[in-house]
Amino acid sequence: MVMYLPEERPVLDLPYQMNHLANNYGYYPQDCKEPICRPQHSTNGRMSSAEAELTSLPVHVSLQDRELWDKFSSIGTEMLITKSGRRMFPSCKVTVTGLNPKVKYVVIMDMVPFDNRKYKWNKDRWEVNGSTDPHLPNRFFIHPDSPAPGEKWMQYPISFHKLKLTNNMLNSNGLVVLHSMHKYQPRLHIVQSPDPCNPHNPGCYLRFTFPEAAFIAVTAYQNQEITKLKIDNNPFAKGFRDNGLNRKRFRDKETQDTQDSDGPVKQDLPPNEHVGRSQKDEDVDVTVSSSVDSSSTQHFSEVASSVTPNPFISAFINLSTAGAPSPQQTHTILSLSNRHLNSPREARPSSLHNLCASLPMAQSSCVQSSTADTNLSRMPSQISSPLNPQQHHHHHHHSSSPASQTPGRSIIQLQPYFLTPPHPSRQCPDVELPLPLPPKLSRMQLPESALRNLEMTPVSDYVNPRPLTDILNRIHFRPLASGPSGKGLQNPPNPEQYLRGSERELFPQIYPAVQEYIDQQFTLNSMLNSQTEHRSQMDYVSARPLTEYYSEQQTGK
DNA sequence: TCCTCTTACACTTTTGAACCGC
DNA sequence: AGCGGTTCAAAAGTGTAAGAGG
């Protein structure tokens, strides 16, 4: 296992030392970046050039909707979990820069325990209610666009709004399973696809945790202030705004209440205060227990040890627990801007939103920087150069002081280890990450259910997790799975023509391009077979769109 | 009694098929 | 035939309130 002590990581440290972000912006302790490599192919504690590929890049990840997250966080974010799965609000949306534009990456998100405590809501605050229940097997959400080249990931904000949380451990539809009344924090994985020229190199990956997006999983909202924030900001909850006066049920109730009213009390209230919310609730002074203070980031080793060894996730965990520094040892930079995207509508913008002309000058220029072919051959530091904070300063701000800049989104950047950053609230700089909003995505483009099969591994496999190489290899070829003819797999192929997934693992991984077509067809088919084997109606239905998705990917639609 | 969880409900947004005109 | 825009019904995503269950 490689220990990435600072002196052993010259490749990692150099770009960050050179980047003037480190000099101009305050550190932010709550976001974490963990570079991790497969250990067995390192030589004498040093990374091979291929392994160094991802971790040597000045990868920046920023959580969007930072203002909204902060609003929730200041109260104590709660996320509803249901049996059928509930989306997060706010959802995790990140911008990534600094990737190699031509290298393919898989982007994954999961939820890790924030601490080892269980909580309960006591009247007006969260309190510790014992220690944590045994952690559930990690379910991770593989972004449906995975794998994709770095330029694609950097082109638009990466939205995880389709990630669903559940408390149903039996659910096999790819939902993230959490314990109610436990606190979690989102974690992002950027996994470099395996190197086709080196079958033994499975690729590196980076992990980013977002303590500022930590939340307590609940089956029913506890804090009325959180409910109010959700209603005010989530378009789907518009029907509950104005305290739900426009809702039939409440109208009826209001009518009844008016008839039954004994007068004075409700007349003293504002017109809408007595609907769905008591006066007592309005007067609640919301406080959050110090035990859930988001600054109390858990040691990474604690997180890792609490994660049940799902084959995929365990591959990450096993690599990181022995040598990777704890989150407190990695330091990040927080940067804020005033670009605020806080609704699904904005996340799925009209075509007008895609016009660079609508963006500020610096945004447009940076959009070009992340997508233009002329930049594709740049060195990593050059690739990220358009994000030079000083340039953004020049475009957006008159003040030279980071603290004086406009709040908004955070920027995370790997910093030299063992530095003690100042508190972000006093040193929140502003770097505008200029990403256009993504085009409208079709629901047909969701191969999530197929990807779920990557984690629906029998319990016995937990003992001997499949190599990361094998899992990544499956993902690696997905977009080309329809084969060279593009739409050749509009109809699902005959399952008997291909090996089953478990049988395939007996064969060696073959990476050369010649083999790709066979491998791709198999990969797709094994996914589809696996779907039908699970007898999930939802998964079965998705089989057809999946093939269409791959065809469209192949034909460049 | 308290706490946690499930369910049905009304409401809103999103999605995609079916048109229509060019 | 292909493309783009519009319409509309169905699906999906919301929090609420009632009630079940431990």
Image (spheres, coloured by chain):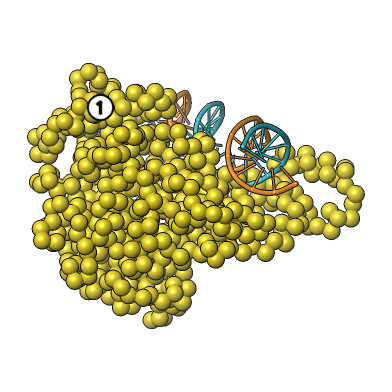
Chain colours: A yellow, B orange, C cyan
Residue A40 locus on image (x, y percent): 15, 52
Instruction: Look at 27% across and 56% down and name the residue there.
Output: A320
* Quarter of the image where one finds residue A457: top left
Q: Is residue A43 left or right of residue A69?
A: left
Residue at numbered disc 1: A525
Q: How many numbered discs, if any?
A: 1
Counting from the top left corner in percent of width and height, residue A514 is at: 9, 34
Residue A47 is situated, as x and y percent measured from the top left of the image, at 14, 59
Front-most of A322 and A491?
A322
Determine the chain carrying the residue at label 1. Answer: A
Q: Which of the two residues, A373 or A85, is positioned nearer the viewer here?
A: A85
Above/below status of A6 relative to A541: below
Residue at the far bottom in the pictured view:
A400
Q: Is residue A201 left or right of residue A451?
A: left
Q: Amino acid at mark 1?
A: Asn
Above or below for A34 versus A13: above
Crowding at mark 1 (Cα within 10 Å: few <14, some 14-19, many 20+):
many
Q: Residue at x 22, y 42 (%)?
A: A467
Q: Is residue A434 above or below residue A437?
A: below
Q: Quadrant of the C terminus of chain A?
A: top left
Of helix, strand and loop, which one carries label 1? helix
| Residue A206 point in image, percent of width and height | 28, 56
Image quadrant holding the N terminus of chain A, namely bottom left
Residue A429 visible, this angle: yes
